[in-house]
Amino acid sequence: MIYTAATQRQIPFEKNISASFYLKLDELLKDEKKIFYEASIASISVLGSQACEELKEMIADCSVFNWDGNNSNPINLASAIRAEKFLALLPLNISEPELSLDGDGQVIFQWFSKNRSVSILIKAEDEILFSDIDGINRAKGSIQFDTWFNEKLSTLIQSLE
């Protein structure tokens, strides 16, 4: 089974059907997709932050397959919704992150200092992956997405500043 980018509906995947068929199917659903993503943009809370504005732009600009010319998937709406919630939970004493997307359309938050970086990937499922890179030293882990900002993540990000 595959999910269409527009509606997240399952469609049986047939091995003998070319990828171009699925691209055409995605094209046929373009109007439905546009309504779907416009509703998503409207639902993002108005926190007044630069990161919220970046997230809105990402939803608008990255809502189609191959948005970057590298065959990347469109932004995953579940990841975008969790990213918006993550931003709403971000403590005021933590600087705003830089945002990006991975090739699967999941939202990544990043914080940088001179020699270190912390990255947090908001998965479509209720999971957050994080990494801390300090030169050659690397640490990584995962936690469940919750209704409060995780203290471990807070401490990790604040240690950059």
Image (spheres, rainbow, N blue to C red):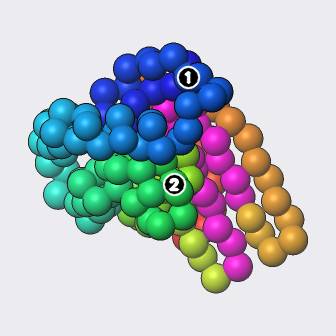
Q: Which residue sits at x=47%, y=44%?
A: 20
Would you identify the image quadrant in which residue 95 lies?
A: bottom left
140 sits left or right of 23 in the view: right
Residue 119 falls inside the magenta stretch: yes
Q: Which residue is mark 2?
A: 72
Residue nearer the viewer, 6 or 91: 6
Mark 2, Cα crowd under 10 Å, few <14 / some 14-19 / many 20+, is some
First-in-chain label (2 vs 1): 1
Would you identify the image quadrant in which residue 83 lies?
A: top left
Q: Amino acid at mark 1?
A: Phe
105 sits left or right of 42 in the view: right
Horizontal and vertical percent position of residue 139 = 79, 53
Q: Which residue sits at x=71%, y=58%?
A: 132
**Tag 2 and tag 1, C-beta contact below 8 Å:** no
**Residue 62 in view in this figure:** yes
Res 54 label: none
Magenta region, main secondary structure: strand
Res 13 label: 1
- Judging from the image, what secondary structure is the residue with disc 2 in? loop
Quadrant of the image for the C terminus?
bottom right
136 sits left or right of 20 in the view: right
Horizontal and vertical percent position of residue 118 = 62, 60
Horizontal and vertical percent position of residue 18 = 55, 38
Would you identify the image quadrant in which residue 138 lies?
A: bottom right
- Judging from the image, what secondary structure is the residue with disc 1 in? loop
Boundaries of the magenta span = 115-132
Quadrant of the image for the N terminus?
top right
Q: Which residue sits at x=35%, y=50%?
A: 64
